[in-house]
Image: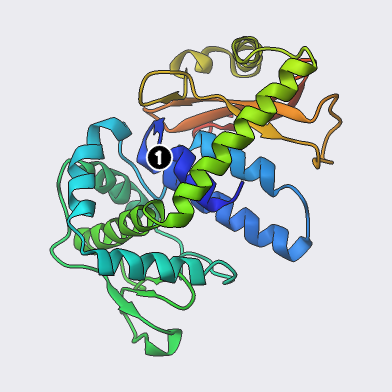
């Protein structure tokens, strides 16, 4: 599963866009690290992102379903020539060693960005589009811009204004939308569905556990691990209300022992504090293979 599959899967999840985008970025960063180390954990990371993100921190809109119509109308108004150009740019960046941003957001910028992601979903858009340049050599001091050749947002050293943060948010939405509209996206959707059907057949053939059982196991483990904080977390759901459980191929996974080659990845999240709990379970024998938590600072 690649970043495109991740985005397409996440488009169907009922969760904050903030969570979605943060996970996408985490996955991209992990992909870059894996290329350097030549490790084989990309499938697990990508699937994790797909399910989770469902996150955030590049983004932040409480519930995707609430903002879909407003934001989608804006995206659909973009000329097709521009959408194609953005998608072509993103595809050309696949092998770029990009860091995403030229510097980290300050704590104050992070807080305002979260609020602005929500406002963006409610129809607060920037007055203009972010400046784009071809190479880093085209960047001038103090300029907020997007560098097309590297996929990096160049941020000014000083604290950014709300308008500048909205320009970044707006362009992130445009990139995501452009990728989702490409022929490759449709192919990815079909490929992902085929993969899911095949993996489910493997689980049935091995007399493995059901998704419902995996959820039960994951919820009990979460309650044991984080106690009272589990009460605020609900399982991720697709926009039709059905539970979002990711099924993935772990045949090449070497980080932990597993009886079968298929696993369920179950995610719970708290939309109030954006905390996450992820549990990966062997689909054959129900053993817990991997746990990942993202608790608010000071509560782990």
Residue 215, by quadrant, is top right
Write down the quadrant of residue 152 in the picture.
bottom left
Locate residue 93 relative to residue 247 in the image: left or right.
left
Which colour style is shown? rainbow
The residue that disc 1 covers is 11
Residue placed furthest toward the bottom: 137
Q: Quadrant of the C terminus?
A: top right
Q: Is 174 rendered above or below residue 19?
A: below
Q: Is residue 38 above or below residue 256?
A: below
Q: Position of residue 268 (x, y in %)?
A: 51, 23
Q: Tell me if residue 231 comes above or below residue 272 in the rendering.
A: above
| Front residue (pair 157, 180) | 180
Write down the quadrant of residue 20 in the picture: top left
Decide if residue 49 is in sight here: no
Q: Position of residue 257 (x, y in %)?
A: 86, 31
Q: Secondary structure at mark 1?
A: loop
Q: Nearer the viewer, residue 184 or 27?
A: 184
How many other residues sit within 10 Å of disc 1, few (<14), some (14-19) or many (≥20)?
Answer: many
- Residue at image position (43%, 56%) is 183
Query: Where in the figure is residue 223, as x and y percent of width and height?
Result: 60, 12
Q: In the image, 167: left or right of 178?
A: left
- Which of 297 and 167 lies nearest the eye of the viewer? 167
Residue in view at x 46 percent, y 43 percent: 8
Is residue 289 visible in the rendered structure shown here? Answer: yes
Residue 227: x and y, percent?
Answer: 58, 13
Residue 113 relative to residue 253: left or right? left
Asked whether, in this view, residue 92 is left or right of residue 204, the answer is: left
């Amino acid at each position: 599963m690649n970043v495109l599959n991740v985005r397409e899967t996440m488009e169907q999840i009922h969760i904050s866009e903030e969570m979605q985008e943060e996970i996408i970025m985490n996955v991209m960063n992990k992909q870059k690290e894996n290329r350097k180390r030549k490790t084989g954990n990309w499938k697990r990371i990508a699937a994790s992102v797909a399910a989770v993100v469902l996150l955030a921190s590049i983004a932040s809109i409480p519930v995707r379903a609430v903002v879909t119509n407003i934001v989608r109308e804006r995206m659909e108004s973009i000329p097709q020539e521009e959408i194609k150009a953005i998608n072509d740019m993103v595809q050309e960046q696949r092998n770029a060693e990009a860091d995403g941003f030229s510097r980290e957001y300050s704590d104050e910028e992070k807080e305002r960005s979260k609020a602005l992601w929500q406002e963006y979903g409610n129809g607060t858009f920037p007055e203009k589009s972010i400046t784009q340049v071809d190479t880093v050599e085209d960047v001038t001091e103090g300029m907020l811009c997007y560098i097309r050749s590297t996929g990096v947002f160049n941020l000014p050293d000083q604290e950014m204004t709300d308008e500048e943060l909205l320009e970044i948010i707006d362009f992130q939405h445009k990139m995501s939308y452009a990728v989702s509209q490409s022929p490759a996206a449709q192919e990815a959707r079909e490929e992902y569905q085929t993969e899911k059907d095949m993996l489910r057949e493997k689980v049935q053939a091995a007399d493995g556990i059901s998704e419902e059982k995996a959820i039960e196991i994951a919820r009990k483990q979460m309650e044991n691990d984080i106690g009272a904080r589990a009460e605020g977390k609900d399982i991720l759901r697709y926009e039709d209300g059905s539970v979002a459980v990711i099924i993935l191929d772990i045949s090449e996974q070497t980080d932990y022992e597993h009886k079968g080659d298929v696993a369920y990845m179950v995610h719970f999240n708290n939309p109030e504090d954006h905390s996450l709990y992820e549990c990966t379970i062997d689909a054959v024998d129900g053993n817990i293979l991997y746990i990942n938590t993202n608790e608010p600072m000071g509560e782990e």
